[in-house]
Amino acid sequence: MNTYNVRVRRLYREERSKNLPASMALIHARYEAKFGEKSVKRHILPDQHEASDGEEIHLLTNGWKIRVRFQRDEDHNAPWSDCDGMGVVCDGHGHPGEHNEYEEWVLNSEHGWYRWYDWKATLPEAIRDDWDAPPYRTGTKREQAMRAMKSNYELLRRWCNDDWWYIGLIVTLLDEDDTELAEDSCWGFESDAMNYITEQVRSWAAHMIVEERTSRRKAAHAARVARRFSDAMAGGI
């Protein structure tokens, strides 16, 4: 028995347990098996994907499409400005610090201008708030804080050197005629967090498909009821 039929049988039992009539339970089970979140997941984006500006179209089994667009989030400020749990970042002309105290904490530089991670200013906060990084809970509080700051520094260094950036994600559901049925979007994703981003795309897409199919099913049911009422009135007259 194929996977689809297995899902239909399992979902049919679940629907019948809700006291639905057999015919309606079968309709719901077939719908969820084909368009439900778990079955949609495999169709939309791999686990890894290049989050550069542009779009991709993903064809679903029923002829509908999912359009996924990435757009660089130019309005997002630097991570240390907009996000909690970031270290203190300074900048200015001339190499920072004395006796090379910040030699390993420079984020980026250009023509005598430097931006650096001020680990001395960050350290008290990191100790107070129990910052840590792998291997967790090893060493003294100071050692844990220093390890966490190094991890935070590396994240910010990569952002400063454009190794990752903030993006906007726009997901649109289209029918077989490319009519837009639904759309969802969110901004401020980290461009290299693709496992998380693709999970969001799949979840949004599955939700939009379920909502659209449910809306159509309700509309068709309402139309049938109205038609029967109209026929009954006409017959009565």
Image: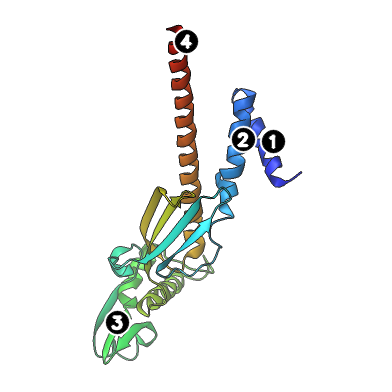
Residue to which mark 1 is pinned: 9
Q: CA distance from mark 1 to mark 2?
A: 8 Å
Q: Position of residue 135 (x, y in %)?
A: 54, 69
Task: Look at the numbered discs 1 and 2 and tell me whether their residues touch, using CB distance below 8 Å.
Answer: yes
Q: Residue furthest left?
A: 93
Q: Are marks 1 and 4 in contact (CB under 8 Å)?
A: no
Label 1 sits on a secondary structure element that is helix
- Residue placed under numbered mark 3 in the picture: 115
Which quadrant is home to the N terminus?
A: top right
Which comes sooner in the sequence, label 4 or label 3? 3
| Type of the residue with mark 2 | Ala
Q: Earlier in the sequence, mark 1 or mark 4?
A: 1
Residue 65 x %, y %: 49, 53
Point out the tag, 3 or 1, that comes first from the N-terminus: 1
**First-in-chain label (2 vs 3):** 2
Q: Residue 215 appears in which quarter of the rendering?
A: top left
- The amino acid beneath tag 3 is Arg
Vertical order, 96 against 160 (above or below): below
Question: How many angstroms separate mark 2 from mark 4 (CA)?
Answer: 35 Å
Could you say where residue 110 lies in the image, as x and y percent from the top left? Answer: 29, 89
Which residue is tagged 2?
Answer: 29
In the structure shown, which secondary structural element does the residue marked by tag 4 occupy? helix
Give SS at disc 2: helix
Comparing labels 3 and 1, the label whose residue is closer to the camera: 1
Q: What residue is rendered at 44% in x and 12% in y?
A: 234
Within-10-Å neighbours for mark 4: few <14, some 14–19, many 20+:
few
Please tell me which residue lies in front, 129 or 153. Answer: 153
